[in-house]
Amino acid sequence: MKLVIGHFYPDLLNLYGDRGNVLALYRRASLRGIDVEIRSISVGDEINEDDIDICFFGGGQDSEQNIMAKDLIEEKGSIIKNMIENGKVFLCICGGYQMLGQYYREHDGSMLKCLGALPHYTEGKKERFINDTVYEFTLPSGEVTKVVGFENHSGRTYLGEGEKPFMKVITGHGNNGEDGYEGAVYKNTFCTYSHGSFLPKNPLITDMLIEIAMRNRYGNDYVLPPLDVSVENEARDQAFDYIQNGKEQMI
Amino acid sequence: MSKTKLAVFAAKFTRKSLRLLGKGATTLPGKIALKVSPSVIKDLSKNKNIITITGTNGKTTSSHMISEMLTSMGYDVINNISGANLASGIATTLICEKGTGKGDKVYVLETDEAAFAKIAGDLNPKVSVVTNLFRDQLDRYGELTHTRDCIANGIDMTSAKLILNADDSLVASLGKGREEKSIFFGIDKATMKSNNVKYPAKKGVLEASSDAVYCPNCNVKYEYESRSFGHLGNFKCPSCGFKSPLERFGIIYDGGISPSMDNFPFSIKDNGSGETKDITLKIPGSHNLYNTCGAIAAVEVFEEVTKGKTNDREIFTRACEAQSHVKAAFGRMEKIAVGDKNLCILLVKNPVGLDRSLSFVAESSDADALMLCLNSNFADGKDVSWIWDVDFESKAEDLPSKIYVSGQRYGDMKLRVTYSGCNVTESGDMSHVMEMLKKALEECPAGKCVYVLPNYTSMLDLRGRLVNELGLKDFWK
C-alpha cells in the first residue's frame, strides 16, 4: 500500500521544526508497512490532485511567505481549493494556516492577500504569542486527549462560517487569545499554530491523519494497524510535566 | 570627575565587591557603568586596537583562535568571555580587564548580532569579522534577514575593514556597496567540490530545513556550482547575477578526507600576496576550516591596517605560523582525558551546530558513545522544536550504538533520536546525567571517546558537575 505526502514549499516554509511533522507521518506510516513517498513541491512545480494523499504546509518568515504567496494563489490555488473540497487530508501550521484563509492584515494596516480556500482571516498585532501550549482534542472516536505544542505567532486568527475550531486551549493563547480555541478544521483540512513539532509528540493525531488518507485511497474499510506509542507518549508526558512544573533554572 | 571616570569607578567598585562575594562579575559592572555614562564604551574605545567577531555560529571559536594567534605573535590580548557578548559584558571587559602589560594591547571581542548594531559605532573596531548567519533561536532573534540588517547598520557606523564569509549569501551581501572595506574568505572556488557534504540528505527522506537559499532582491532561488554545508557554497542568483565574491583568503582541501581527524592537513591561499601555505587544522570539524581561515584573515588584515601595509606576504606567513599554536577550548572539541579514555564536549546551540557536531561524531574513528543534553531555559531558547530542523536521518547509521539523552527536555530529544531510526540506550533529566556519563565512560574501551553534545545551559550545568564529581579542572573561561 502506498501513501504520498506532498510537502509544500519545504525550501521556504520550514520554520520551527515543521519538517518534524512530515517525519512523523513518514515514520508511523512506514512502520506499518505502508510505502511512503515524500514529494517536495515548491515554486513552479506542477501538482496533480490524484497524486497526493496528504498535503503539508509549514510556516515561514515573512520574506519567504511573500515569495511563495504568488505561486500558491495564481498557480496552484484552484487545484488546492478542489483538493480541500474533495476531502483530501491537509495539515497546515502557522503561516500555512494563515495562507489558506482570506487575508492577513499586518499591524501597520498593510494587507497580504491569501488563498481564500477557507473563510478565516488574520489580524497582525505587535505582541507575539510565544508559549509552550497544551490543548484538548476530541478524536473522531469521541476520546478526549491532551495535545502539547509550542506557539510563536503575532497573527490573531478568527474563524469563519463552516469552519470549526481544531482544539480547546488549556495553556497558551490559541487562535487569537480571546475565544479559547486553537486552529481550524474544515472537512479533512486541519490547521494549527502549534509548532513543536506538532505531530511527533501527538501520535494519535498523526495516526488519525494517516487513517483518513488511507481511507480516501483504499476505501472506508481500511483500518490502521495498531502501533506502539510509548516513546511518543513519554515525550508528551515529559513536555506536559515541564510545562506545568518546569522552572527557569539559574546557572 | 567626568561622567566616564565616574562610570569606570562605579564599575570597578562593583567588580571588586562582587569578586569578594565569589561572583564572576562579567556583566553587572558594565551595566552599571553604562547607566552612569551611556558613552562609556565610546570613550574607552578611543585609540584602542579592537577586533570584533559577530555571526550566529563560530563566534567563540573564532575569537579564541584570533586571540591565541595574536598572543603567540607577542600581543597583549584582552577578551570578553563567551557569555558576556552584549554591551554590558563588553563595557565590563573594556573597564576591568587589564591584560599582562607585555606587548601591544589588542581587544578581541565577540559581539552578539543584535548588540552589534548598537555598539559597533562606539567600539569603532579596526577589523570586524562576520562568520556566518544561520537560523538561531528564532523566538529570541527573529528572522535572519533582520539579523543581517542589524549587522549592516552596525558596520556602517565604523571605519572597520570587514572580514566576510564569501560562501554565505547573507554575509557576502554585506559587501555590496562596501567594496572598499570588504575582504572575503571561503573555500577556494577552483578546488571546491560539487558536494563537500559527507552526509547529504538520504534519498526519499526529507532534506534538512534550509536558510537563505533565495536571493532576497529577486525572490529567485540561488544556483550553486558547489556547496560545503547548510546554505554555504559557491552560489549565484540567475536573475541579478549576485554571486559568491572572489575570496582573498581561500581554503584549499581535499574533500575526500574527513576533517574530523586531528591535525587534518590543508592549505590557505592568500590571493592578495599570491602566497599559499600548508597548515593543519588545530580544532577539527569542517566548520573549523572556515573559522580558521576567517581567523587568519582577521590577523593578517589587522596587522596590515595597523602597520600601513597591503597584501603583505610576510604578515601572511607569520599569521599561518601563529595558527599552529591554537589549541581547542573546553566545550569546543577539546578532548579531556579521563583515565585512559576521552571525553569530548561539543556545545550545540542551533540546528547547524548540532548538524555539524553529529556529522563530526559520525565521521570520527574513536566514538564509543554519544550523549545529547537538551535544556529549554531562556538562554537556550524556550522552544525546542529546532531539533527537528536537524538532519539526524543521514547520519543515523554512522552514529555510535550507545546513545544517552539528558536535559530538561530529554523526552523531546529521545523522540527525535528514535524517529531518526537510532535506539536510545538510556535517558533521564540532569539529575541522572552523571550516572549515565559515568556508565558510558566505564563501558568505553581505552583510547576511545564519549562525545557529549549539550546546549547552552545544560553545558553550564554539566560543567559544574564534571568539576565536582570527576575532579576535572574548571579551565573554561
Image: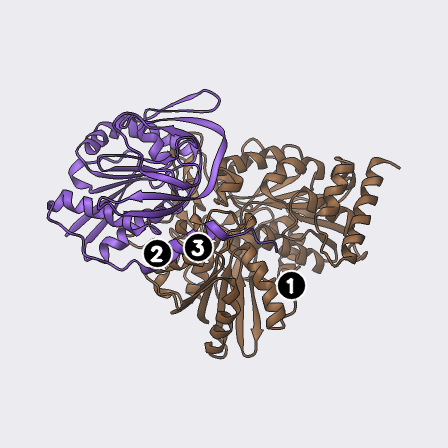
Chain colours: A purple, B brown
Provide the chain ID for the residue under circle 3. Answer: B
Task: Give, as a three-letter code, the residue at label 3.
Answer: Asp
Mark 1 element type: loop
Measure how far apart labels 1 and 2 are at the Cα level: 50 Å
From the top left corner, tell me how far across and down residue A239 is, in percent. 43, 53
> Is residue B147 visible to us here?
yes
Question: In the picture provided, is A74 more to the left or to the right than A155?
Answer: left
Q: Are marks 3 and 1 in contact (CB under 8 Å)?
A: no
Which element is circle 3 on?
Answer: helix
Mark 3 / mark 1, whichever is N-terminal: 1
> Which quarter of the figure has residue B101?
bottom right
Residue B95 is left or right of residue B61, and the answer is right
Classify mark 2: helix, strand or loop.
Answer: helix
**Disc 3 and disc 1 on one polypeptide chain:** yes
Q: Nearer the viewer, mark 1 or mark 2?
A: 2
* Residue type highlighted by circle 2: Asn
Q: Which residue bears the numbered disc 1?
A: B325
Front in this rendered view, residue B178 or A181: A181
Q: Residues within 10 Å of mark 1 (few under 14, many from 20)?
A: some
Q: Is residue B312 visible?
A: no
Which quadrant of the rendered structure holds the N terminus of chain B?
A: top right
Q: Nearer the viewer's eye, disc 2 or disc 3?
A: 2
Residue at left offset 78%, top offset 41%: B44
Residue B395 coordinates in the image, percent (x, y):
37, 60
In the rendered view of the protein, which quadrant contains the C terminus of chain B? bottom right
- The alpha-carbon separation of the residues under discs 3 and 1 comes to 28 Å
**Residue designated by label 2:** A233
How many dots with numbers?
A: 3
The residue at which mark 3 appears reads as: B355
Q: Is residue B461 left or right of residue B396?
A: right
